[in-house]
Image: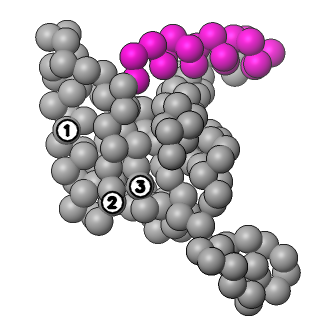
């Protein structure tokens, strides 16, 4: 394996060793996830997890397998209408930090609306467009793309 700074080139030519960034669009029912490439240039949809009892264990597996060191967590802001979900997000932030993650809160204003529009424009099947997890994942992509422009 050949090493070039923080990246490594394996014998089969794959680039490894870059620390990826994960973005999460945290909701009461689902959590949409997006992942950066190792060079922190491209944000791609990853998956949507059910926000239930096994959620943290599933997320931990993803964090380990993808080499995630930073999580960008969508923050709806401090409006009174967001109080309940924001409390859950801040609790989730503490849980991530206890796993050794660097956590960045990022303004997620209008990301769900933008993601809905993106799904409408790119997914041709009406049945597939009804998958709400698709919107959550794409909202996470938007959050991550905005963050990546600043690093």
Task: State the residue position of label 1.
Answer: 90
Which circle's residue, 1 or 3, is located before the other in the chain?
3
Q: Position of residue 6 (x, y in %)?
A: 59, 74
For the point 18% across and 19% down, the residue is: 78
Q: Is residue 48 visible?
A: no
Q: Quadrant of residue 45?
A: top right
Q: Quadrant of residue 88?
A: top left
Spatial separation of the CA atoms under disc 1 and disc 3: 16 Å
Q: Which residues are magenta?
A: 108-126
The foreground one among 87 and 145 is: 145
Specify whether residue 4 is painted magenta: no
Q: Position of residue 121 (x, y in %)?
A: 74, 12
The foreground one among 20 and 83 is: 20
Q: Tell me: residue 88, above or below residue 135.
A: below
Q: Position of residue 97 (x, y in %)?
A: 25, 57
Q: Position of residue 1 (x, y in %)?
A: 74, 89
Which circle's residue, 1 or 2, is located before the other in the chain?
1
Give the residue furthest to the right. Answer: 12
| Numbered disc 1: secondary structure | helix
Task: State the residue position of label 2.
Answer: 101
Near mark 3 (Cα within 10 A), the count class, few <14, some 14-19 or many ≥20, is some
Task: State the residue position of label 3.
Answer: 70
**Secondary structure mostly taken by the magenta-highlighted segment of the chain:** helix
Marker disc for residue 143: none
Near mark 1 (Cα within 10 A), the count class, few <14, some 14-19 or many ≥20, is some
CB under 8 Å between discs 2 and 3: yes
For the point 78% across and 73% down, the residue is: 14
């Amino acid at each position: 394996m050949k090493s070039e700074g923080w990246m490594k080139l394996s014998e089969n030519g794959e680039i490894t060793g870059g620390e990826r960034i994960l973005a999460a669009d945290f909701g009461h029912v689902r959590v949409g996830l997006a992942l950066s490439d190792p060079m922190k240039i491209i944000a791609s949809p990853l998956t949507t997890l059910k926000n239930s009892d096994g959620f943290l264990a599933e997320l931990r597996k993803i964090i380990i397998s993808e080499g995630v060191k930073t999580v960008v967590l969508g923050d709806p802001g401090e409006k009174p209408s967001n109080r309940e979900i924001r409390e859950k997000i801040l609790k989730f932030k503490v849980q991530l930090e206890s796993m050794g993650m660097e956590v960045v809160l990022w303004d997620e204003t209008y990301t769900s609306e933008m993601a809905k529009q993106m799904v409408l424009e790119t997914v041709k099947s009406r049945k597939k467009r009804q998958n709400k997890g698709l919107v959550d994942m794409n909202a996470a992509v938007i959050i991550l793309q905005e963050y990546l422009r600043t690093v």
